[in-house]
Image (cartoon, rainbow, N blue to C red):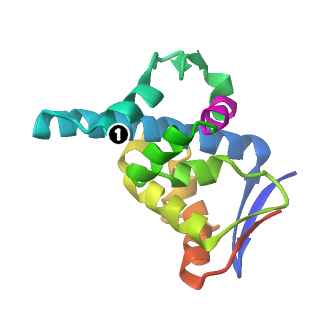
């Protein structure tokens, strides 16, 4: 059993465990992206926007090799979803064009839908964090076309926003 994503004739599927791992690694890559953006903006502009400083504090507090958000790695996805109950946090994600992380992680693993707008936000997120995903095992499932017999998850989300059709989760 697993999770399948459909939009028109484009499909991506994997096990529930693999989908959980993919989302967790996307969260971690997004944290890496925010850290990098924070450091580069600090170097370029000196004074950082309050939004970026808030985002850094939300995502990077107590980050270490063992903990993310000050919690054990095994709970990363669950605790990210809990963190998403904070509207200020959601605004920060949207401010830095990574709101697709909220859409991606706050959806059922079965019998659900992503809207074309959700899909566009998720592809925008994927575009921004690609350099940071390369160190994670989920990279090939999202980006790599070479040697793949099946679609990438990016392909399904892209099909959704380009055709303006909902993406179905089964």
**Place of residue 18 in the rendered image (x, y in percent of width and height, measured from the top left):** 70, 43
Image point (35%, 39%), residue name: 51
Residue 117 figure quarter? bottom right
Which residue position holds label 1?
51
Task: Say which of 168 and 137 sits in front.
Answer: 168
Label 1 crowd (10 A; few <14 / some 14-19 / many >=20): some
Residue 136 visible within the image: no
**Place of residue 127 in the rendered image (x, y in percent of width and height, measured from the top left):** 41, 59
Q: Where is 70 relative to 12, above or below?
A: above
**Place of residue 161 in the rendered image (x, y in percent of width and height, measured from the top left):** 56, 75
In terms of secondary structure, where does tag 1 sit? helix
**Place of residue 165 in the rendered image (x, y in percent of width and height, measured from the top left):** 67, 80
Residue 20 figure quarter? top right
11 inside magenta stretch: no
Image point (50%, 39%), residue name: 88
| Residues drawn in magenta | 78-84
Question: Residue 93 vs residue 46: left or right?
Answer: right
Image point (70%, 74%), residue name: 166
Residue farthest to the bottom, as pictured? 163
Q: What secondary structure do most residues of the magenta stretch adopt? A: helix
Task: Say which of 52 and 114 sits in front.
Answer: 52
Image point (53%, 23%), residue name: 68
Question: Residue 74 vs residue 127: left or right?
Answer: right
Q: Where is 120 relative to 37, above or below?
A: below
Q: Where is 121 relative to 80, above or below?
A: below
Residue 27 visible within the image: yes
Which quadrant of the rendered structure holds the C terminus? bottom right
80 inside magenta stretch: yes
Q: How many marks?
A: 1
Question: Residue 13 vs residue 138: left or right?
Answer: right
Task: Say which of 155 and 109 sits in front.
Answer: 109
């Amino acid at each position: 059993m697993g999770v399948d994503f459909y939009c028109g004739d484009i499909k991506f599927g994997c096990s529930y465990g693999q989908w959980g791992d993919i989302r967790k690694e996307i969260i971690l890559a997004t944290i890496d992206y925010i850290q990098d953006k924070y450091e580069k903006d600090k170097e370029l502009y000196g004074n950082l926007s309050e939004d970026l400083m808030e985002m850094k504090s939300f995502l990077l507090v107590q980050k270490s090799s063992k903990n993310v958000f000050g919690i054990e790695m095994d709970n990363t996805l669950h605790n990210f979803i809990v963190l998403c109950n904070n509207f200020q946090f959601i605004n920060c994600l949207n401010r830095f064009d990574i709101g697709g992380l909220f859409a991606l992680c706050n959806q059922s693993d079965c019998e659900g839908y992503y809207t074309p707008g959700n899909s566009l936000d998720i592809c925008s997120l994927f575009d921004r964090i690609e350099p940071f995903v390369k160190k994670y095992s989920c990279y090939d499932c999202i980006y790599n076309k070479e040697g793949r017999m099946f679609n990438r998850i990016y392909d399904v989300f892209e099909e959704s926003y380009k055709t303006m059709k909902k993406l179905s989760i089964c």
